[in-house]
Image (cartoon, rainbow, N blue to C red):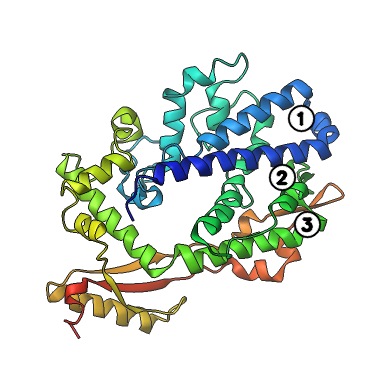
Amino acid sequence: MVYPGANHTRFEHSIGVMQMASDMFDSIITKKQNLLSDELSLDTSSIQVYRKIIRLAALLHDVGHAPFSHSGEDLMPLLPKGHIGYVEGQEKRYEHEDYSIEIIKTVFKNIIEQHPIIKVEDVTALLGDKTVRPPKASLIIWKDLISGQLDADRADYLLRDSKHLGVSYGLYDRDRLVSCMTVGKMEETEALRLAIEEKGWHLAESLVIARYQMFSQVYFHRVRRIYDYHIYRATKSVLENKGLCGVYPSPTQISDYLKFDDWAINAALQEGLGDMHGAIIINRKHFKCLEKTSDNPSEDEEAQIKARAQDYENQGIECYLDDKASTSWYRLDKDIAIEEHNNIQPLSEKSSIVKAMNEKPRLLRLYVERAREGRGR
């Protein structure tokens, strides 16, 4: 599960997202240039500038990921008081987007601003940078191309992961998705919003279903989930053994954070700095899944599996109760927009399947050390 090719795979994905965002943008401009020119005062020159900004944001959107991607999210430090995202009483952590934004504003600033018009804030604004107010307010309508229910990121990773894993769960018609991208007006505010043409709403539905299938069959697979845990524990040990209190440096220490990549953590695991969980990863002797609940367990099911976990812990047997295999397949508050005659209709009004997919699963799995799995029964 630890392999030096991870950096290459992420770069391949970033290139794919950049191309996907470019194709979506071009498709929209081809169809809606007159509308955009009227509403946003876009001319040919500004369209080309926006295209460059979108490509840069798409290419660099994941540059702040920790080693081994999302398994490192829980090792990012807590937000300090005074941070724009800090909430009293909540333990909110930095996210990889915070690191991406900081890297772009420091490491890539001079490169980006060699362009006579583009500023680094134009790029970070599309990634959710709350500390800047982009000078081009009309640029923000393109934010959903980078981060939204129908963004270039998920559109690319579904196809790419399906290809590399040799499965068909995440497949959909990419070319038709691109050709159906458009913009429409919100009925209440008349604000512009990215959308799918009405003739392609079944395609939007298929993309949501593809995401559901990939999460339920691949991303939440029991073996993949336990390796997330082992990577988290092993990396935490590496950081502790390097005197970092078990968390990565914050975005304010971006040069120190950048010293940690897949290669650095892999080398530390080979040196034994990952302790027990590092050895588990290297030898591929992961904890075994002994029990699991239904996707939406009753209170009794949850109580039983938690009691079993406590039973193992009382006997000094290390176990892991995975209660984080949960995601929202579809958020009704961020409905995909379907455009018909320049007006917007939510996808959930078109698709009864999508409307029913807003429930979050709460699957729990209990894992135990392989050598001791027979004890505690």
> Which structural element holds mark 2?
strand
Q: Earlier in the sequence, mark 3 or mark 1?
A: 1
Q: Is residue 176 above or below residue 83?
A: below
Label 1 – label 2 distance at C-alpha: 14 Å
State the separation of the CA atoms marked 3 and 2.
14 Å
- Name the amino acid, label 2: Leu
Residue flagged by tag 1: what amino acid is it?
Leu
Regarding residue 60, the answer to whether it shows in the image is yes
> Which image quarter holds the N terminus?
bottom left
* Cα separation between marks 3 and 1: 25 Å
Q: Is 143 or 107 nearer to us in this picture?
A: 107
Frontmost residue, 129 versus 325: 325
Query: Mark 1 or mark 2: which comes first in sequence?
Result: 1
Disc 2 designates what residue? Answer: 194
Q: Which residue is mark 3?
A: 200
Front label number (1 vs 2): 2
Q: Point out residue 175 in the picture as x, y percentages from the top left corner.
A: 72, 50
Alpha-carbon neighbours of circle 2 within 10 Å: few (<14), some, or many (≥20)? many
Horizontal and vertical percent position of residue 351: 72, 67
Q: Is residue 363 left or right of residue 212?
A: left
Residue 107 position within the rendered picture, expressed as x and y whole percent measured from the top left:
42, 24
Residue under label 1, please give it: 40
Residue placed most toward the observer, 46 or 39: 46
Query: Dividing the picture into quarters, in which one does residue 49 lie?
Result: top right
Residue occupying image coordinates x 36% and y 67%: 223
Amino acid type for the residue under numbered disc 3: Gly
Look at 49% across and 62% down and name the residue there.
327
